[in-house]
Image: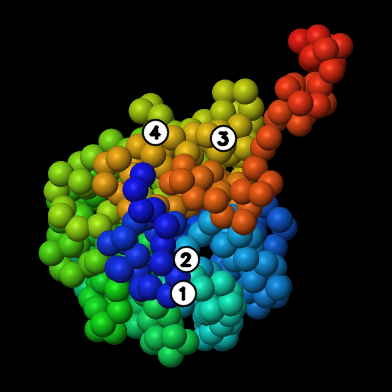
Amino acid sequence: MGNTETRQGAGLLERLDNGAVICAEGYLFECERRGYLQAGAFVPEVVLDHPELVAELHREFVHAGSDVVEAFTYYAHREKLRVIGQEHLLEPMNRQALGIAREVARESGTLFAGDLSNTNIFLPDDEESHRHARTAFEEQVAWAVEEGVDFFIAETFSYLGEALLALEVIKETGLPSVVTLAIHQPGVLPEGESVGEACKRLEDAGADVVGLNCARGPQTMLPLLQEIRAAVSGHIAALPVPYRTHAGEPTFQSLRDPAYPDVPGGRAFPVALDPFVCTRYEIADFTRDAYDLGVRYLGVCCGAGPHHIRSMAEALGRTPPASRYSADMSKHSFYGDVAASKEYKELAEKL
């Protein structure tokens, strides 16, 4: 894959010009699985309640190969905190999340990213919603700049208009930006733009990296990346969810499990997606395919575990510290060429 190693100490754009950059996302689902975050609200109260857990998760992702420590401020905006009646925690939550991420990034030599996300109040034809969304972005951006972020991620936008609004606020800081859209079942944005058109508009508006995150798994994200590659000239981001979405159910929200249809609401999303999880080998295949398309900003979104990030790094030819523990089945008692006796190999066929 050529020069895929990032240069420690280099900024985002320099690293992208010299190879791939891996960004681990998916903190919401991982913290929920561990019993420290409530599905539904998905507000990262864990950064205040258990900061040590968040710091450790950052370190686990870096150990697995992430080049970026992304502050866990997804859904830590004013509207989400209003929903759970905790607006007074807005600044402390953001400051804490940023401080945790900065510490891990600085100790590991990785990039420190601020994070903005969909506000869930933006509507294309509602100017008041635009003002409220902009205020939310301005608050989070200001705190992130004060805490010393290296660049900004603006992610999971359904509406192009909201993504452009977030980008406007980021551009005022002069810091690099990665702006990614979440593409739902129709395959186009609600305002009517195709994915390629939307990413071209973001690039023209000054985004340094444009692309997709969340919603779609590898199989249904890859065709859209081809469309983006044909439309833009700059860097592309791709951060799928690690779930087996397909043409009939192209998003993880649309997945249905016929083996157990009695989940609440009939949907596997968000806490019954286990039967659909991609293997590390599927993530590696996606990584190579996306890289061959020219995608250089890569990651995995909601549902990601460190093993997915390690697989992505190894698919790029890297050996992160976690590779010391990558599988070596030659040492297995039944299946191994080294450890297994003739008798155990025969027994293995009956396991």
Residue pointed to by mark 3: 279
Q: How is the image coloured?
A: rainbow
What kind of residue is marked 4? Gln
Quadrant including the C terminus: top right
Where residue 280 appears, x then y in whole percent?
55, 38
Say whether residue 131 is visible.
no
Nearest to viewer (mark 4 / mark 2): 2
State the SS at label 1. Answer: strand
How far is mark 2 from mark 1, CA to CA?
6 Å
Where residue 319 appears, x then y in whole percent?
55, 51
How far is mark 4 from mark 1, CA to CA?
29 Å
Q: Earlier in the sequence, mark 1 or mark 3?
A: 1
Residue pointed to by mark 4: 219
Quadrant including the N terminus: top left
Q: Earlier in the sequence, mark 4 or mark 1?
A: 1
Q: Nearer the viewer, residue 87 or 326?
A: 326
Residue pointed to by mark 2: 68
Residue pointed to by mark 1: 112
Marks 2/1 in contact by CB < 8 Å: the verdict is yes
State the SS at label 4. Answer: helix
Q: Earlier in the sequence, mark 4 or mark 3?
A: 4
What kind of residue is marked 3? Thr
How far is mark 1 from mark 3, CA to CA?
28 Å
Q: Earlier in the sequence, mark 3 or mark 2?
A: 2
Q: Nearer the viewer, residue 132 or 100?
A: 100
How far is mark 3 from mark 2, CA to CA?
23 Å
Nearest to viewer (mark 4 / mark 1): 1
Q: Residue at x 15, y 44 (%)?
A: 230
Mark 2 Cα-neighbour bin, 10 Å: few <14, some 14–19, many ≥20:
many
